[in-house]
Structures are given as C-alpha cells and as structure tokens.
Image (cartoon, grey):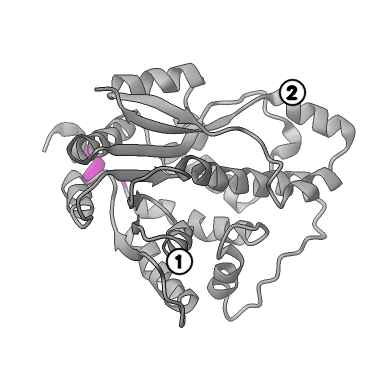
Amino acid sequence: MNSNEELLSKDRDYSSISPSARALLLLKGFTDIPFALEAAKLISRPDHYQPDFSIQELAFWGRVLHFESRYTSIDQLLAGLPARNILEISSGFSFRGLSSVMNKEVYYIDTDLPEVITTKQSLLDDLLHQQIPKGKLETLALNALDEAAFTATTDHFPAGEVIVVNEGLLVYLDMDEKRKLCHNIREVLRQRGGYWITADIYVKSPNRFPGFQMKDKLQEFFREHRIEENKFNSFEEAEAFFNSEGFIIDKEAEAGHRDSGSLKYLLANATREQLENMRGVGRVRATWRLKLAD
C-alpha cells in the first residue's frame, strides 16, 4: 500500500457522507424520478411523507430541478449503449438500478457504503414486492476507492463490457482521491471495455445567483464537506484532469430542463429578473461519458 492509499484508508471517515443520501431522496420525492416518491414515503415511516408543491422558495425549486436534471442526464448517456453490465458507485437512495432491471435484461450492481446499503436493501424489498424484474440487481456495500473491493465487485459481472455510473461522488473527493477512483475505473475498463458516465463535472461558481443559496442543514453539510473546494476550476481543467488519467470525452449530455417535471414550479415562483439572473450565471455542471484514450 502506498502513502496515498494509507491516507485514504486510515484518515477519512467516508460514512460522514451518507446522511446527505436521505435528504436528497426526500427532495427527489418532488420529481418524476422512478421510485423516488415511493422510496421517500418508505424511508419517512412512521411519519407521513407528502411533497408540498405549494412551497414558494425559489432556491428550493432550483435545488430540486438541479438534482432531477442531474439524474436524467445519466439516463440520456446510458440510452443506446449495448453493454448489459452496469455498476453504479455511491448510488445513495437512487433507484436507477431497480428501474433498469424492471425494464431491461441488464446485470446491475448498485453500491454504496454499508450503512446506506443496509437501509436501501430494506427499501428494495418493499419496492420489489410481488414484482418480477427482467434483469438482475445486486445491492452491495463498496468503498469505491478500495481497489481490491472494486475489482472483486466487478468480477460478479458475466463476460462483456462494463458501464460505470456515478452522480454526487466526485465533489466529496480531493484530487488524490479523484485520481484513485480514476485508477480503479481505468483498470476495470482496460480489462473489460466500456464507459464511465459521471454527472459530477462541477465547476466553482463564485458569482452564483444568491437567490439559489439556501441556509439549511443540507447546505451546511455541503460546507462541512468542502464541496465547493472539491469542484474543478473550469470545464477545461476537468477535461485536462481526465485526459491525464487516461480518459477522453466520448459524449456530453445535452443541457436542458424541458423534460423536468419540477421546472414548472421553479418558473411559477421566479420573477423575470430572477430568471435572467439565473441564465447569467452560466453552466456550473456537466455530465460526461468517458472512455479510455488508448
């Protein structure tokens, strides 16, 4: 084990990241994301969860729209790929895997840290009640920075290319940790072929529209985990980083919110001036489908 691996394994408690998964699920309950509403109701028991669409806070709807668009951008880049082996890392309480196996004959491995997976498995048992999936879904605990565990997990797949998917992970990792993750994914793709789809191409935005800043526990959580510091300085820097790690951009998801169910609520609660200010901020995130350069 080299010094970086020792640092990653000994000095970082990744379980501190997990509480955000529940908060994001409750947000996604306001969207059309498959199984999000059902799962939000289940995880809220014994309380009764019901999305309140009368909320008028612009920042709230901006946050909902952001996470809904991030989710659908991955589906956009998955569409049409022939590979049937899909690994999602740090999936939180996203149920893309369940949605995928219900509709397609794919082998989907859904992973996150143990405390998330334990809860998620109980949710899946309820969501899958008396339903027969077309594909196969495995839900496994995995620290994606652990090379041996990463390889052992992908060894579950049958022969064929692998697609690695993630959203909401890279912003928790510093540059050394990002490089470690790149190494683990690169080694699997070298052996198996395939793609890496990441929705985590975030860039720092010091001029971000102040109307989108919420003062709540989730925002404080983001500050505690140095989310802004872990973003790339620019999209050019991000591309150079992945190039240096042996990846090139195969395709970028098309930006746009027209198909987002939450868009109408944001528009209903924003003034014309606020909409113009939001447009003036520019892009702060992208979703890329990466492949090996060689």
For label 1, count other residues whose C-alpha is less than 10 Å away and answer few (under 14), some (14-19) or many (20+): some
Q: Where is residue 215 in the image (x, y as percent from the top left)?
A: 68, 46
Q: Give the magenta part as a residue range.
A: 7-12
Q: Position of residue 123 (x, y in %)?
A: 46, 73
For the residues labelled 1 and 2, the Cα–Cα distance comes to 40 Å
Depth check: 53 or 3 in front? 53
Depth check: 43 or 288 in front? 288
Residue placed under numbered mark 1 in the picture: 102
Residue placed under numbered mark 2 in the picture: 280
Q: Do we see residue 269 in this rendering?
A: no
Which mark is in front, 1 or 2? Answer: 1
Which label is found at residue 26? none
Q: Residue extending furthest right?
A: 272
**Type of amino acid at the residue the image marks with label 2:** Gly
Quadrant of the image containing the C terminus: top left
Left or right of 110, for residue 150? left
Residue at (17, 38) in percent of width and height: 191
**Type of amino acid at the residue the image marks with label 1:** Met
Q: Magenta segment: does it hold 10? A: yes
* Mark 1 element type: helix
Depth check: 224 or 292 in front? 292
